Image: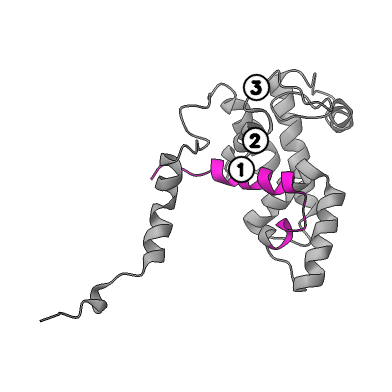
């Protein structure tokens, strides 16, 4: 006699969603709180996140961004001249410094982090008219990586396709591949152990 057990079967997708963070961690994904990453600069990420985004904002987003940018190496320098933890171009740092004359040097980790988070805030504000919530942060990160104009072009292409753009996912396919990878990496780094 065969028993009908179909009523006891659980759909597979809720289990996958529940286990995904654990599976990714087991596969070697190092989230932002992983012991692999130093906490040496956390006080700066906390301070400037609070200053530019408010007390309730999760400062770890900016640490994840610095990991994606430089692997948390304060002496990192890109082939195009971007410097430090947040990989800021010296000319961009000077523009930021006009509004923040107390920022001393792009080479100082404290001021590099402060400038990067300040710049994130400027980009975050630029997207406020179009995008809400966490999605707006993805657009700010995409703009940090590819430039606001390039992400705006991608947004317009997505608008032509979908009419109403509500998420980064809708725009990602029109953004440069490096930018898609960058935003995806920051989001993966924000996974936490369960």
Q: Nearer the viewer, residue 64 or 5?
A: 5
Circles 2 and 3, Cβ within 8 Å, touching? The answer is: no
Q: Residues within 10 Å of mark 3 (few under 14, many from 20)?
A: some
- Residue 143 image point, x, y percent: 78, 46
Q: Nearer the viewer, residue 132 or 2?
A: 2
Identify the disc placed on residue 68.
2
Report the residue at 25% width, 78% height from top: 7
Q: Earlier along the polypeptide chain: callout 2 or callout 3?
A: 2
Report the residue at 49% width, 26% height from top: 36
The range drawn in magenta is: 170-194
Quadrant occupied by the N terminus:
bottom left
Q: Which residue is mark 3?
A: 73
Residue 149 is left or right of residue 161, and the answer is: right
Vertical arrangement, residue 155 with respect to residue 58, above or below: below
Circles 2 and 1, Cβ within 8 Å, touching? The answer is: yes
Report the residue at 69% width, 49% height from top: 180
Q: Is residue 190 magenta?
A: yes
Q: Main secondary structure of the magenta part?
A: helix
Q: Nearer the viewer, residue 118 or 172?
A: 172
- Residue 101 image point, x, y percent: 85, 25
Rendered image quadrant of residue 112: top right
Q: Earlier along the polypeptide chain: callout 2 or callout 1?
A: 2
Vertical arrangement, residue 8 with respect to residue 33, above or below: below
Identify the disc placed on residue 185.
1
Gap between marks 1 and 3 measured at Cα: 17 Å
């Amino acid at each position: 006699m065969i028993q009908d057990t179909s009523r006891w079967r659980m759909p597979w997708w809720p289990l996958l969603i529940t286990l995904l963070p654990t599976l990714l961690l087991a596969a070697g994904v190092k989230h932002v709180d992983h012991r692999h990453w130093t906490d040496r600069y956390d006080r700066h990420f906390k301070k400037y996140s609070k200053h530019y985004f408010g007390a309730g904002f999760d400062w770890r987003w900016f640490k994840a961004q610095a990991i994606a940018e430089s692997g948390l190496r304060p002496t990192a320098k890109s082939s195009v001249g971007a410097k430090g933890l947040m990989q800021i171009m010296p000319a961009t740092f000077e523009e930021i410094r006009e509004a923040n004359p107390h920022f001393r040097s792009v080479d100082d980790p404290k001021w590099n982090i402060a400038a990067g988070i300040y710049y994130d805030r400027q980009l975050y504000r630029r997207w406020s008219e179009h995008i809400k919530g966490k999605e707006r942060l993805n657009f700010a990160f995409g703009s940090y990586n590819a430039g606001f104009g390039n992400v705006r072009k991608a947004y317009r292409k997505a608008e032509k396709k979908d009419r109403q753009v509500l998420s980064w996912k809708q725009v990602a396919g029109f953004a440069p591949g490096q930018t898609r990878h960058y935003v995806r990496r920051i989001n993966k780094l924000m996974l936490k152990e369960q």
